[in-house]
Amino acid sequence: MDLSNLMHNYPEAVSMILFAIGFSNLLLQKNLIKKIIGLNIMDTAMYLFLALKGYIVGRSAPIVTDGVQSVEAYINPIPAGLVLTGIVVSVSVSALMLSLTIRLYRRFHTLNLDEISTMLKKEGL
């Protein structure tokens, strides 16, 4: 087994491990707050991966300074823009999920998804 490729691409491996942790947390947890945390971990893993794919060693941010206008001097700005847009959307989605979780807690007095489902079945909804 050749570990040189893994060691060369360890940031990508860390991103995949973070995504797997968030995904398993999202699937296995019963508590709604823990599910939201798992989704946020998955978001962070994707932002890390996109930032890694957009970075090129030896190049700088795409801000024209000192009259250098060559494309080869700068990194790709599109992944950075996607990450910033994703962060804004992620914050909005997290705020919405947390507000809905508060509403569920006020109604059912629990954050356990199985208990909420059972109570909804008893009510006939």
Image: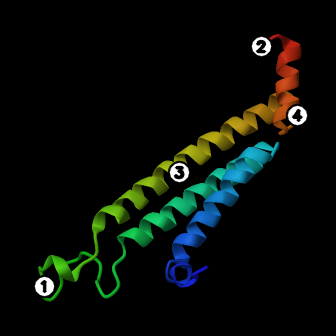
Quadrant, the C terminus: top right
Which mark sits nearer the N-terminus, 4 or 1?
Answer: 1
Q: Amino acid at mark 4?
A: His
**Image side of residue 83 versus residue 21, left or right:** left
Give the label, 4 or 1, closer to the camera.
Answer: 1
* CA neighbours of label 4 inside 10 A, class few (<14), some (14 to 19), many (20+): few
The picture places residue 51, in percent across and down from the top left corner, at 43, 69
Quadrant, the N terminus: bottom right
| Distance Cα–Cα, label 2 vs label 4 | 17 Å
| Distance Cα–Cα, label 4 vs label 1 | 61 Å
Q: Amino acid at mark 3?
A: Ser
Identify the residue at image location x=54%, y=52%: 91
The picture places residue 45, in percent across and down from the top left corner, at 56, 62
The picture places residue 68, in percent across and down from the top left corner, at 13, 85
Query: Residue tagged by mark 3?
Result: 90
Above or below, 61 against 87 in this view is below
Q: Amino acid at mark 2?
A: Leu
Give the label, 3 or 4, closer to the camera.
Answer: 3
Identify the residue at image location x=85%, y=32%: 114
Query: Residue tagged by mark 2?
Result: 125
Query: Residue tagged by mark 4?
Result: 109
Which mark sits nearer the N-terminus, 3 or 1?
Answer: 1
Which mark sits nearer the N-terminus, 2 or 4?
Answer: 4
Q: Secondary structure at mark 1?
A: loop
Say whether marks 3 and 4 touch (CB < 8 Å): no
Q: Nearer the viewer, residue 57 or 106?
A: 57
| Distance Cα–Cα, label 2 vs label 3 | 30 Å
The picture places residue 110, in percent across and down from the top left corner, at 87, 36
Above or below, 83 against 115 in this view is below
Which mark sits nearer the N-terminus, 2 or 3?
Answer: 3
